Image: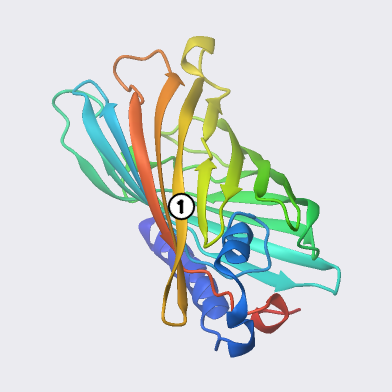
């Protein structure tokens, strides 16, 4: 994929994000409690515009036991299809600082492969909630070590339980992406992701969270296939005037990693995130078809 095409794809995606987020807030919705807003942010298919910035720090990566840093910019934009059905778009833009794969390689910094998911989901915001839809991976990486030059296509689904009066929000997100184009240098792929999540909410917007990201490379040998982290952390909704901000931090350690001494996944790490949920913009006023 040429660099010119990659730049146009990135510009198009960021254009879609800006169209969805530049909306004047509605003061009437500002009375939403911090606890209710926290539970809504924990719902991946909520009718809520938000822009999370997730900082991932992975230790002991590669042959030199170095630090890998990944900033994921993850705008979520709801689109109202009808009174009972929404389309929730989720984009992940990774900015990566990658240590060398071999002792003589330098660190590489740049953009990874962008993923875009569109969940078809019922408009209800309580009880058993689900979402299903396609996921597309764009080969937008600025360096061969930061991604794969093949386009990817797959399916994604999410299910969760969110009940009024209950402090619990729990569920899971799952997807699998297959390469669908050719490349002269990069191999084909079939990548699986499972993210179970459990949240316990306290009054005032403070909550406990565990949301590990489990991955599998189906093209790899059985001993180099799975990465399984365990851990958890805390989060809090904080208001700065009219602007609500969701702060969260989790720590984890991998109980299973690919058995590959050259390109080793870090043993432990942590992530911190801050997101800006536009609680004052109901889905019917954000984007509507």
- In this rendering, is residue 121 above or below 27? above
Front-most of 125 and 208? 208
Q: Position of residue 209 (x, y in %)?
A: 52, 43
Position of 210 with respect to 238 (left or right) is: right
Position of 288 with respect to 181 (left or right) is: right
**Number of disc labels:** 1
Residue sticking out furthest to the front: 203
Residue at coordinates 60% horizontally, 68% vertically from top-left? Answer: 77
Position of 25 with respect to 162 (left or right) is: left
Q: Where is residue 218 in the image (x, y as percent from the top left)?
A: 58, 23
Front-most of 252 and 207? 207
Count neighbours of disc 1 (C-alpha within 10 A) and say few if under 14, some if 14 to 19, many if 20 or more.
many
Residue at coordinates 51% horizontally, 21% vertically from top-left? Answer: 226
- In this rendering, is residue 203 above or below 18? above
Q: Position of residue 4 (x, y in %)?
A: 38, 63
Residue at coordinates 67% horizontally, 43% vertically from top-left? Answer: 170
- In this rendering, is residue 30 above or below 46? below
SS assignment at label 1: strand
Residue at coordinates 51% horizontally, 45% vertically from top-left? Answer: 208
Split into 4 quadrants, where in the image is the C terminus?
bottom right
Residue 268 seen in render: yes
How does the figure colour the protein chain or chains?
A: rainbow
Q: Name the residue under label 1.
A: 235
Q: Where is residue 8 in the image (x, y as percent from the top left)?
A: 45, 67
Residue 54 seen in render: no
Give the image quarter of residue 7: bottom left
């Amino acid at each position: 994929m040429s660099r010119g095409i990659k730049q146009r794809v990135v510009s198009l995606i960021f254009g879609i994000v800006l169209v969805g987020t530049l909306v004047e807030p509605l003061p009437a919705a500002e009375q939403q409690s911090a606890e209710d807003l926290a539970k809504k942010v924990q719902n991946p298919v909520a009718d809520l515009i938000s822009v999370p910035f997730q900082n991932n720090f992975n230790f002991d990566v590669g042959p030199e036991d170095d630090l890998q840093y990944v900033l994921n910019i993850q705008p979520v934009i709801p689109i109202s299809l009808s009174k009972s059905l929404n389309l929730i778009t989720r984009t992940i833009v990774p900015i990566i600082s990658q240590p060398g794969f071999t002792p003589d390689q330098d660190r590489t910094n740049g953009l990874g492969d962008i993923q875009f998911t569109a969940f078809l989901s019922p408009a209800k915001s309580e009880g058993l909630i689900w979402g299903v839809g396609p996921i597309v991976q764009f080969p937008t990486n600025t360096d061969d070590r930061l991604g794969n030059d093949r386009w990817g296509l797959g399916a994604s689904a999410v299910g969760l339980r969110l009940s009024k009066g209950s402090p619990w929000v729990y569920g899971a997100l799952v997807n699998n992406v297959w390469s669908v184009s050719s490349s002269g240098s990069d191999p084909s792929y079939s990548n699986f992701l499972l993210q179970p999540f459990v949240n316990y909410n306290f009054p005032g917007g403070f909550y406990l969270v565990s949301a590990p990201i489990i991955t599998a490379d189906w093209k790899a040998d059985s001993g180099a296939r799975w990465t399984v982290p365990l851990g958890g952390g805390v989060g809090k909704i904080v208001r700065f005037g009219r602007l609500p901000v969701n702060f969260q931090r989790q720590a984890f350690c991998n109980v299973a990693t690919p058995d590959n001494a050259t390109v080793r996944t870090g043993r432990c790490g942590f992530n911190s995130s801050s997101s800006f949920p536009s609680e004052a913009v109901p889905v019917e006023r954000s984007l509507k078809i």
